[in-house]
């Protein structure tokens, strides 16, 4: 089990839960939640939390999250029974104050979107963008450009972009994110039983410093989904002296 961060450190994580369908073909939301609890993140980006077909009911029930974890689910869903938007959401520890939420429409052959959250934490203010990028490189590049444009229209703030980048190349989408963002792949996360590809990654903007990162590869995680969760422990620069909060 991976211990949560303490003090002025912040742990981010990302997990493609595969609609809670495990490699044993059993759909067990409680098993997924046990993995999430073990990762011990402060803020956690999730992908494939909803079923694919309309009305896209949640594969990971909202009430189960409230009952069996210390997380809240921000209201990314527009309406209906979905947990998030375009199959994504961001879970946040109850003690963390969420200050803003946005949905970012992304270009591509199929409907895609990113979810953006801004929060005040004990480690400092942070913006987290959860992504599940497309399978084709051209569209991934366009999607990253759309995300960067959306971020650029907001107040400057330490920003992390994390999720399933769907990129098998070694350098990943680093060129599209540079120079402002530094892309990190904590390790192979797919397929969960015998991971060979670092599909799940985190990009860090100015003001965020990577202290440690890894892949959560416990026995339950190796069967709960087709992806393993990734995590990253960060340090956030303090705001400049005399600056007003954004």
Image (cartoon, grey):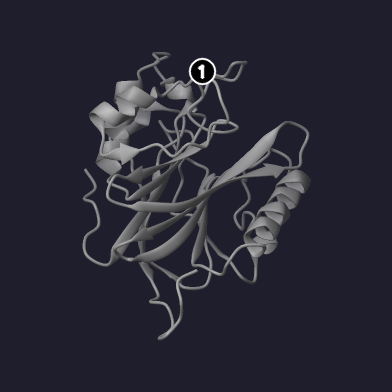
Q: Which corner quadrant holds the N terminus?
A: top left
Q: Residues within 10 Å of mark 1 (few under 14, many from 20)?
A: some
Q: Is residue 222 left or right of residue 180?
A: left
Image quadrant in which you'd find residue 245? bottom left
Residue 92 locus on image (x, y percent):
36, 45
Q: Residue at the front extreme?
A: 244
Q: Is residue 115 left or right of residue 242?
A: right
Residue 124 locus on image (x, y percent):
36, 67
Q: Residue at x 31, y 24 (%)?
A: 64
Query: Does any portion of residue 209 appear in the rendered image?
Result: yes
Q: Residue at x 71, y 48 (%)?
A: 143
Q: Is residue 212 above or below residue 217?
A: below
Residue 159 locus on image (x, y percent):
51, 62
Residue 221 locus on image (x, y percent):
33, 32
Q: Nearer the viewer, residue 215 or 60?
A: 60
Q: Nearer the viewer, residue 79 or 198?
A: 79
Image quadrant in which you'd find residue 36? top left
Q: Nearer the viewer, residue 170 or 210?
A: 210
Q: Residue at x 40, y 15 (%)?
A: 27
Query: Does any portion of residue 220 appear in the rendered image?
Result: no
Q: Is residue 9 above or below residue 88?
A: below
**What residue does disc 1 label?**
57
Q: Is residue 157 left or right of residue 28?
A: right
Q: Residue at x 71, y 32 (%)?
A: 111
Q: Is residue 8 left or right of residue 101?
A: left
Number of marks: 1
Q: Residue at the bottom extreme?
A: 241
Image quadrant in which you'd find residue 29? top left
Q: Secondary structure at mark 1?
A: loop
Q: Is residue 69 above or below residue 144?
A: above
């Amino acid at each position: 089990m991976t211990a949560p961060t303490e003090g002025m450190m912040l742990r981010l994580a990302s997990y493609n839960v595969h609609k809670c369908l495990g490699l044993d073909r059993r759909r067990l939301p409680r098993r997924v939640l046990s993995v999430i609890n073990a990762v011990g993140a402060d803020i956690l980006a999730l992908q494939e939390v909803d079923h694919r077909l309309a009305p896209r009911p949640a594969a990971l029930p909202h009430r189960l999250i409230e009952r069996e974890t210390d997380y809240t689910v921000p209201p990314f869903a527009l309406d209906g029974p979905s947990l998030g938007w375009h199959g994504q959401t961001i879970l946040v520890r109850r003690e963390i104050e969420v200050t803003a939420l946005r949905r970012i429409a992304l270009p591509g052959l199929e409907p895609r979107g990113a979810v953006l959250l801004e929060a005040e934490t004990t480690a400092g203010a942070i913006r987290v963008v959860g992504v599940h990028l497309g399978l084709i490189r051209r569209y991934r590049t366009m999607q990253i450009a759309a995300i960067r444009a959306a971020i650029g229209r907001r107040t400057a703030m330490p920003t992390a972009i994390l999720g399933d980048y769907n990129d098998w190349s070694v350098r990943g989408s680093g060129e599209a994110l540079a120079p402002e963002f530094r892309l990190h792949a904590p390790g192979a996360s797919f397929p969960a039983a015998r991971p060979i590809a670092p599909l799940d990654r985190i990009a860090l903007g100015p003001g965020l410093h990577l202290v440690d990162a890894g892949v959560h590869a416990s026995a339950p995680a190796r069967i709960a989904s087709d992806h393993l969760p990734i995590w990253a422990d960060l340090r956030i620069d303090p705001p400049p002296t005399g600056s007003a909060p954004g």
